[in-house]
Image: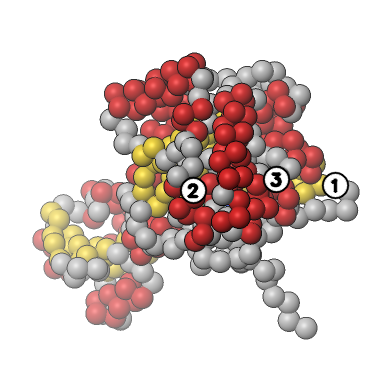
Amino acid sequence: MKYQVPMGMKDITQESKIYRKLEDNFFKILLQEDFTEIRTPILEDKSLFIRSVGESSDIVSKEMFETKDGLVLRPENTAPVMRAFVNDQNINTKLAYFAPQFRRERPQKGRYRQFYQYGFEIINESAPQSEISSLLLIKRIYEQWGLTKYEFQVNYLGDKQDRENYIKTLTDYLRGVESKLSKISQERLQSNVLRILDSKEGEDQDIIKQAPSILDSLSENSKNQWQNILKLAQLVGLNIVINPLLVRGLDYYTGMVFEVVDTSGQLGSQKALGGGGRYDSLSKELGGPDVSAFGFAGGVERLILALNITNLPLSETKIGLITTEESVLSSFISLKAQFPMVKVDINYNCAMGFKKMFKRADKIGCTKVLIVGTQELSAGVVKVKDMVSGVETTISGSIESINLSNI
Ligand code: AMP
């Protein structure tokens, strides 16, 4: 019998280099910003997610993989990170992860049952500092990955009371048009009314467009906080798009929520690259101290789709060193040892001839080739061939003086 990989999951082999590079680059920035990597268990108590993400969310109501003893494969990493903080409040309050998550979803492009998320949580830092510094941090992370076609969509959910007021206003409005709503939204009217704003059903669209805005249900205090965030965004030149319909499906959010939305068109209907927001009541909800928190998580598979692999600035330079001169071989070997971070392939072969050595270098993916033949040796130069453009240049000086990381 031939076993198949489970539905909505995949073996990552060819792409593993990309995952590795994305993860390394992610942590390079996060560690520089004083975050600590956190690796929580893959299994957690089911009740952790019921308590945090919420009973009526899609994740909890139908997407968790459950074991016999009440554990689930984690569907997201914010609640586990907060659980870890509540368990040990001495840990760093800036925590980051790059880890697989599991949701029993109907697989489609950009939607899988096992997917990776990169994310971070900042505990005990209040608005508007976390909001704006987090968006700037995310911008920096995407910039170094080479992603430019996206926008930040933001909304403000206020505090618990604002949210309750809004749910009431929205429910009243939707009850008035209930019979025109899609079947699924009619069901959500009973269970999770905010999720109706996320509906993609055709018959719901006009109703949603005319729905009351949450921004009108905010208390004076919340309105001020929201204005402070917007002011700071403007002062630092951060472009954001206000989307009053953005509520995100999870229960724990308060204050600002946001999504990073792809604008390249590569992602089809699954356009959200990532999302997050403030969740000030989560620590307390999980039995911890009353501390504020703000977090973000993005999906790796969607990022790879958005980057459109061929555009990835991840293609490493691999340098071929080729010579027909035995005396040059030792210089090649020392040069390779001197630059351990650069990929180098040495080819010394007096019988093969340069043409064949070029062919071989091309085949194994060398992007640049340094050539030292009899002529170069006597002239004291090194020839460099760019294998992509075919352009040849000459560098004066001996092979020993070459800085491989600048080639
Ligand atoms: P969420 O907290 O559900 O908004 O998830 C944050 C990000 O994780 C999303 O914006 C996606 O990029 C990614 N994501 C969520 N669910 C999936 C999934 N089933 N497959 C792939 N990526 C996902």
- Which residue is pictured at 41% across the width and 28% down the height? 132
- Which residue is pictured at 33% across the width and 60% down the height? 311
N-terminal label among 2 and 1: 1
Cβ of mark 3 under 8 A from ligand 1: no
Residue 39 visible at all = no
Q: Is residue 365 above or below residue 161?
A: below
- From mark 2 to mark 1, how far is it between C-alphas? 37 Å
Q: Which residue is mark 2?
A: 208
What kind of element bears circle 2?
helix
Q: Mark 2: which amino acid?
A: Ile
N-terminal label among 3 and 2: 3
188 and 181: which is toward the camera: 181
Which mark's residue is nearer the viewer, 3 or 1? 3
Q: Which residue is mark 1?
A: 70
398 and 305: which is toward the camera: 305
> Residue lying farthest bottom?
1
